[in-house]
Amino acid sequence: MSDYGFDELGGLTPPFKVWAEPESGRLYSIGVDTAEGLGHGDQSCVQVVRVDTGEQCACYCERIPPDLIAVIAHRMGRWYNAALLVVEANNHGIATLNTLRHLGYRSLYRRRQVNRIYNRVTEEYGFKTTRSTKPLIISGLDEALRNQEVIVHEPETFVELKGYVRDEAGHMGGSPFDDRVIALALAHHGRGYMHLREPEEAERDDYMTFAWWARQGEDPDKGRLVVGAHTRRQPSRALR
């Protein structure tokens, strides 16, 4: 693993860049943009942003396969106080998400969508980039940069931000690469998501387990199991 950002003892090595190490009690959001890992293609990129200040704390960009970028993101997330991982759930990102879940990482970004087959709202892992959602995160990042709500330290990220444009057809992209921009936009999007959810709720990944069902019956005021507490039964005839 020494070529991919960590040595045999788990220490950080290039191309892992750190500008601010994790501080106790702070929340962090990590954006993960995945690629196929070919030597001539796009890079997989991981951007770490501090939630309260918007400071770029760390960055990792390299041409590695989706399962290996999951290992990098997993270690970075654990180091930054179990940070929220916002993984792009397109193409190779699905493999990254599957590896992260296999590794047991629980603080993963989830999106709500309507399951038309069962007519119910479900939660899916990762951020799905579409023609409607991509402008949303890019516009959010653009506004934050203009208002100085995001602090960028890496020169390469600056270069990609300056080269990111929208053409006459409305397509957005960077030349030659925009991996750092997308990862940073995902990390910034995660900042708002973390403000909406309690940290302990974001950590749980036990849907439909016994613990999940037990919580459905908890009294929030008393903190005890009250399943069936309001169930009424007809008195037995023998007692009449």
Image (cartoon, rainbow, N blue to C red):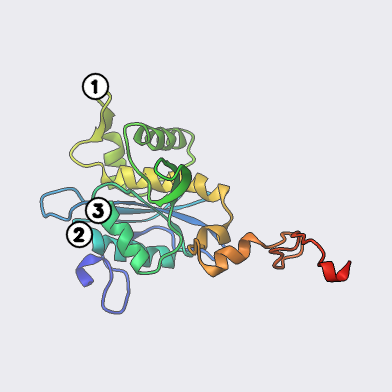
**Which residue is depicted at the point 25% across and 53% down?**
44
Q: Which mark is residue 65?
A: 2
Quadrant into which the C terminus falls: bottom right
Ranked by sequence position, the earlier of labels 2 and 1 is 2
**Which of these two is toward me, 222 or 225?**
225
In the image, is 129 to the left or to the right of 177?
right
- Contact between labelled residues 1 and 3, with CB atoms less than 8 Å apart: no
Quadrant into which the N terminus falls: bottom left
According to the picture, the residue beneath numbered tag 3 turns out to be 44
**Which of these two is toward me, 49 or 133?**
133
Q: Residue furthest bottom?
A: 9
Amino acid type at circle 2 is Pro
**Residue 58 shows in this picture:** yes
Q: Residue furthest top?
A: 168
- Contact between labelled residues 3 and 2, with CB atoms less than 8 Å apart: no
Residue 122 x, y percent position in the rendering:
46, 48
Residue 175 x, y percent position in the rendering:
19, 36
SS at mark 2? loop
Where residue 16 sits, quadrant-wise, is bottom left
In the image, is 8 to the left or to the right of 101?
left
Task: Bin the neighbour count of mark 1 within 10 Å (Cα to Cα): few under 14, some 14-19, many 20 and up.
Answer: few
Q: Which mark is residue 71?
A: none
Q: Which mark is residue 169?
A: 1
Residue 199 x, y percent position in the rendering:
56, 58
Ranked by sequence position, the earlier of labels 3 and 1 is 3
Tell me the distance, in whole angstroms, between the alpha carbons under discs 3 and 1: 26 Å
Residue 217 x, y percent position in the rendering:
66, 62
